[in-house]
Amino acid sequence: MEALSPVLAAILPLIAVAAAVHDVATYRIPNWMSVVLLAAFIPAALAAGLEPRLIAIDALVGLAALLVGMGLFAGNLLGGGDAKIMAAMAPFMGLAALTEFVLFTAVAGGLLALFALVVRRLPERLRTRGPGWWRRLAEPRGPLPYGVAICAGALVAFPASRIGLAAFGG
């Protein structure tokens, strides 16, 4: 089972990149991405050799992330897809990498917001030309594809998680 650890653990970075790209392109994160992550968590944790007690704790981290995400969604501070992908990634981070996940997500979100502010101050002729994602990002007071920040935070923090360490060296 441990030979499967890197394969199962690779699901998180692959889904993270796919979710970020999809969010930029459509401002949506499909539900199937969160479902795949949730379905992969227990097999990945078992393959990484985590004890049932640690698996349960890390699953509770995911539940807590879902509750926080639901609150942020209710307050119109986070999109539904963002809340779901964050909650699906959180068990992979577990307690071991939760702080890094939250911190790096916040930093990436801040950088995304700064980038959007710069884009939104460009002359109109530069804001209204280009692909749809660019024009949408350039809309004054428009939404941000925050899934990009969540996925960036996950990619940076994941190597410090128990599953990441077990799968990729540690």
Image (spheres, rainbow, N blue to C red):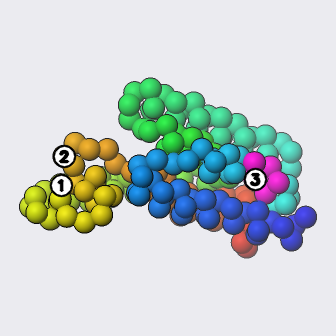
- Mark 1 vs mark 2, CA separation in Å: 6 Å
Q: Nearer the viewer, residue 159 or 141?
A: 141
Residue where numbered disc 3 is placed: 40
Q: Which residue appears at 41% of the width and 58% of the height?
A: 25
The reply to whether residue 124 is visible in this rendering is yes
Q: Is residue 71 left or right of residue 118?
A: right
Image coords of residue 49 (percent x, y): 86, 58
* CB contact under 8 Å: marks 1 and 2: yes
* Circle 3 residues within 10 Å: few <14, some 14–19, many ≥20: some
| Mark 1: secondary structure | helix
Residue 46 on image: x %, y %: 85, 55
**Rendered view: 63 above or below 41:** above
Q: Which residue is mark 2?
A: 140
Q: Residue at the location (40% across, 57% down)?
A: 24
Q: Position of residue 145 (x, y in %)?
A: 39, 51
What distance separates the C-alpha of mark 2 from that of mark 3?
39 Å
**What segment carries the magenta color?**
39-45
Q: Are marks 3 and 1 in contact (CB under 8 Å)?
A: no
Percent position of residue 6, x then y: 76, 69
Residue corresponding to mark 1: 120
Type of the residue with mark 1: Arg
Residue at left offset 75%, top offset 53%: 40
Residue drawn where x is 45% and y is 32% of the image: 72
* 40 inside magenta stretch: yes
Q: Quadrant of the N terminus?
A: bottom right
